[in-house]
């Protein structure tokens, strides 16, 4: 009987650990964030680049208006990247972001739709994108 309860306890521990790891490192969705349109006609948003996440990771912009993102890395060691590759929609960005630094990108979306952006860096075990470092650019 003791063997059975020990086995159950181990399974419970493994399940709890995997659930916690998924919540901590899995893809987290934020509420859609609408980029602010300034008087100069440019839509702007600050994007926090952290270990395997972008915040916000769902950004809404307006079609045919310039967009400027300030990508701010809060990591201390690991470099990241912002990639969005839909040239047919005016979205063709591949920008590296050094740890603790910021980078600015500008583009003008030319088609409505939802487009994935992600980090194209690869880690020892998996790519940053597969670890959840991705988001959606929604063009309205």
Image (cartoon, rainbow, N blue to C red):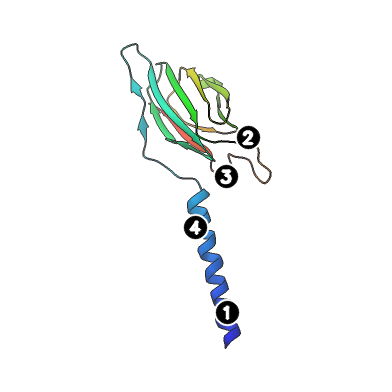
Mark 4 surroundings within 10 Å by alpha-carbon count, few (fewer than 14), some (14 through 19), many (20 or more): few
Q: CA distance from mark 1 to mark 4?
A: 21 Å
How crowded is the residue under tag 3: few (<14 C-alpha within 10 Å), some, or many (20+)?
A: some
Left or right: residue 12 versus residue 41 is right
Q: Whole-percent x and y of residue 23?
A: 48, 53
| Image height of 41 relative to 15, above or below | above
Comes first in the chain, label 2 or label 4: 4
Q: Mark 1 and mark 3: span between their CA atoms?
A: 32 Å
140 vs 7: above or below? above
Q: Residue at x 39, y 21 (%)?
A: 44
> Circle 3 — which element?
loop
In terms of depth relative to the viewer, which is nearer, 53 or 110? 53
Q: Which numbered disc, 1 or 4, marks the residue that appears first in the sequence?
A: 1
Check if mark 1's residue and mark 3's residue have beta carbons within 8 Å: no
The residue sitting at the right extreme is 124
Query: Which of the image's four quarters has the N terminus?
Result: bottom right
The earlier-in-sequence mark between 3 and 2 is 2
Disc marking residue 131: 3
Label 3, label 4: how many angstroms apart (C-alpha)?
Answer: 15 Å
Q: Nearer the viewer, mark 3 or mark 4?
A: 4
Please give the residue where the numbered disc 4 appears in the rendered image: 20
Secondary element under disc 2, as helix, strand or loop, is loop
> Which residue is at a point 55% across and 22% down the rendered structure image?
93
Q: Residue at x 54, y 20 (%)?
A: 88
- The first of marks 3 and 4 along the sequence is 4
**Residue pictured at 55% horizontal, 76% vertical:** 8
Query: Which mark is on residue 121?
Result: 2
The residue pinned by badge 1 equals 6
């Amino acid at each position: 009987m003791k063997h059975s309860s020990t086995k159950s306890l181990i399974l419970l521990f493994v399940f709890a650990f995997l659930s916690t790891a998924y919540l901590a490192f899995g893809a987290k969705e934020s509420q859609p964030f609408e980029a602010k349109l300034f008087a100069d006609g440019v839509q702007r948003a600050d994007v926090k680049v952290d270990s395997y996440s972008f915040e916000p990771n769902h950004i809404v912009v307006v079609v045919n208006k310039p967009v400027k993102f300030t990508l701010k890395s809060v990591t201390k060691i690991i470099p990241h990247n912002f990639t969005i590759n839909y040239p047919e929609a005016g979205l063709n960005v591949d920008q590296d972001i050094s740890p603790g630094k910021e980078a600015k990108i500008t583009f003008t979306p030319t088609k409505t739709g939802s487009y994935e952006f992600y980090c194209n860096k690869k880690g020892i075990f998996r790519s940053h994108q597969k670890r959840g470092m991705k988001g959606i650019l929604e063009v309205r």
